[in-house]
Structure formats: structure tokens, C-alpha cells
Image (cartoon, rainbow, N blue to C red):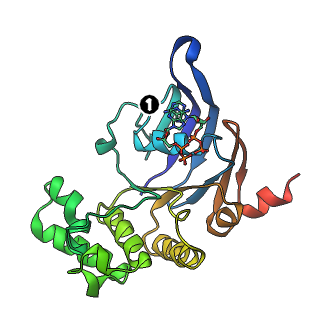
Amino acid sequence: MASISFRNVVKRYGTGKSAVQVLHGVDAEISDHEFIVIVGPSGCGKSTLLRMVAGLEEVTDGQISIGGKVVNDLEPSERDIAMVFQNYALYPHMSVFDNMAYGLKIAKVPRDEIRTRVDKAAKILELGHLLDRKPRALSGGQRQRVAMGRAIVRQPQVFLFDEPLSNLDAKLRVQTRLEIQKLHRELGITSLFVTHDQVEAMTLAQRMMVMNAGRMEQFGTPEEVYNRP
Ligand code: ADP
Ligand code: ADP
């Protein structure tokens, strides 16, 4: 688990005359264990900010640190993060166990250790009885939990959620939101959660970063944000 800091973070896409600046100096300090929601309208730069933490986009200017260490120049694989996406595509031909274990096998984690970590994640996510099934034999909610299991087993210092609820129907959205809250209570992993949905933001956030047009306009608890003019 780790703190995250943004120091005057700037992002430009493209170069020369076609360059477009989409983040205009974001500053924020996030503590260990916090659950932060990044909220704002489509196109305001939320995904860009998250993808820079993940190392999927370069930081144009400024610094991003995780656990006090500047990560600007680190590859995604060198960062202690796990990302949960909107489209949680599972490998259809692999069992639930193998879906969760896959990243660890690639990382050459020893077999016993993989077994231990997958069993632990399966217990937290109530997937223990489904480990031998293929994704097609799961409900939507169970698939979403497998996708989260795949992130948990990596034991990251930071969780990055990129609109993980937006493709789900209303019922599943509520269920998955509760699941994410439970995960955070149990594991306490520092989390950044991107959404354009204000209700989702209010319900999940310990603090929220309210973005607009490439700037962070407010940063505080939901109470602080909604009581301020
Ligand atoms: P959000 O996640 O808030 O919807 P994004 O971070 O996806 O916003 O996008 C912020 C702005 O950056 C948008 O204007 C978008 O069109 C632009 N943008 C995103 N990715 C790229 C890219 N690879 N090249 C050029 N512009 C991009
Ligand atoms: P999101 O739904 O997360 O806001 P988008 O649908 O805007 O994402 O973008 C999907 C992908 O296309 C992202 O990888 C983003 O970086 C890229 N992208 C977005 N806007 C542009 C753009 N103007 N030029 C090039 N790539 C873009």
C-alpha cells in the first residue's frame, strides 16, 4: 500500500502545432489506504490521469509518485499497481483459477505461492466454489469478481479502476459497488476510481477529485465538495 502524489502534472497529446494540452497542472496528495474517486464530465482528462499513474501514457511535465518514489520513467510492469477496466475480458478457454493465476505465471511466481494467493482472493470474493468453471458458465457478477480477483492476486500497492461499473446493468452495478467497498475495507489498498457518475462518486469516495477541462477544481470529502459553492 502506498501514498500517491501528483505534482504539477501536465499532459499534452501530439507535438508541435497539433499538440493539445489536456491536463493543466494537477496537484494532489493521496494518503496510504485512501479510496479516491476522480469524477468529471467526459473528456475532462480523468482517464489520462489514471493511465499516467499506470504508466500507459507518458507524463509531459510534472511528477507522479507512488509510495514516495517518482514513477514517471518506470514501465507499467515496474509499478506496483493493478488496473480494473470497464471491459473485463476474461480468457474464455481458461478456468476461473487460470484466469486469476495467469498474470502470476507470466511473472514466474512459484506455483505454491500462486495457489495461496488465488485461494485467498477467491475466499474474499466468494469464488471458491467456482474455480474450475469457465467464464461462460458464470453470471455477469461472478465474471466481474473474477476480473477483480485477477487484480487482487498481484498484491499491488495501488488499485486503479477505470469506470469498471459503466457497462453493467443497474442491479449488477450496485452489487459490484458493494463488492469494491468490501474489498477496500478488507485490504485497504490505496485506490483511484474514475467515473463520470456523480452518485457513484459520492457513494464510493472517501475523498473526490472533481475535474473539469483538464483541471482539478475541488478535492475533498463528498460533504466538503457538495457544501461548497
Ligand atoms: P475522460 O477520461 O475524462 O473522458 P480522457 O482523459 O479520455 O478524458 O481525455 C481527455 C482529452 O484528451 C479528451 O479531449 C480526449 O479526446 C483527449 N485524448 C485522450 N487520449 C488521446 C490521445 N491518445 N490522443 C489525443 N487526444 C487524446
Ligand atoms: P474513455 O471512454 O475512457 O473516455 P475514450 O472513448 O475517450 O475513452 O477513448 C478510448 C481510447 O481512445 C483511449 O485509449 C484514448 O486514449 C483514445 N483517444 C481518446 N480520444 C482520442 C483522440 N482525440 N485521439 C486519439 N486517441 C484518442
Which quarter shows the N terminus? Answer: bottom left
**Residue 152 appearing in the image:** yes
**Quadrant of res 155:** bottom left
Question: Residue most toward the bottom?
Answer: 129
Q: Residue furthest top?
A: 16
* Above-or-below relation of 176 to 70: below
| Ligand 1 contact, mark 1 (Cβ < 8 Å) | no
Is residue 106 shown above or below 130? above
In the image, 112: left or right of 182? Answer: left
- Report the side of 31 relative to 113 (left or right): right
Residue at 42 percent across and 32 percent down: it is: 72
Q: Residue furthest left?
A: 111
**Marker count (numbered):** 1
User: Residue 84's spot in the image, x, y percent?
Assistant: 42, 58
Q: Which residue is mark 1?
A: 58
Q: Secondary structure at mark 1?
A: loop
- In this picture, is 96 found above or below 51? below
Q: Residue at 53%, 40% (x, y): give it.
A: 48
At label 1, which amino acid type do we have? Glu
What residue lies at 29% left-to-right and 60% top-to-bottom?
154
- Position in image of residue 215 (x %, y %): 69, 37
Asked if residue 129 lies left or right of residue 173, the reply is left
As rendered, which of 181 and 18 lies closer to the eye? 18
Spot occupied by residue 85 in the image (x, y as percentages of width and height) = 44, 57
Residue at 20% across, 67% down: 93
Quarter of the image holding residue 19?
Answer: top right
Q: Quadrant of ligand 1?
A: top right
Density class for disc 1 (Cα within 10 Å; few <14, some 14-19, many ≥20) is many
* Residue 5 shows up from this direction: no
Q: Is residue 158 above or below residue 96?
A: above
Which percent across, then down, holds residue 141?
Answer: 44, 77
Q: Is residue 86 left or right of residue 123?
A: right
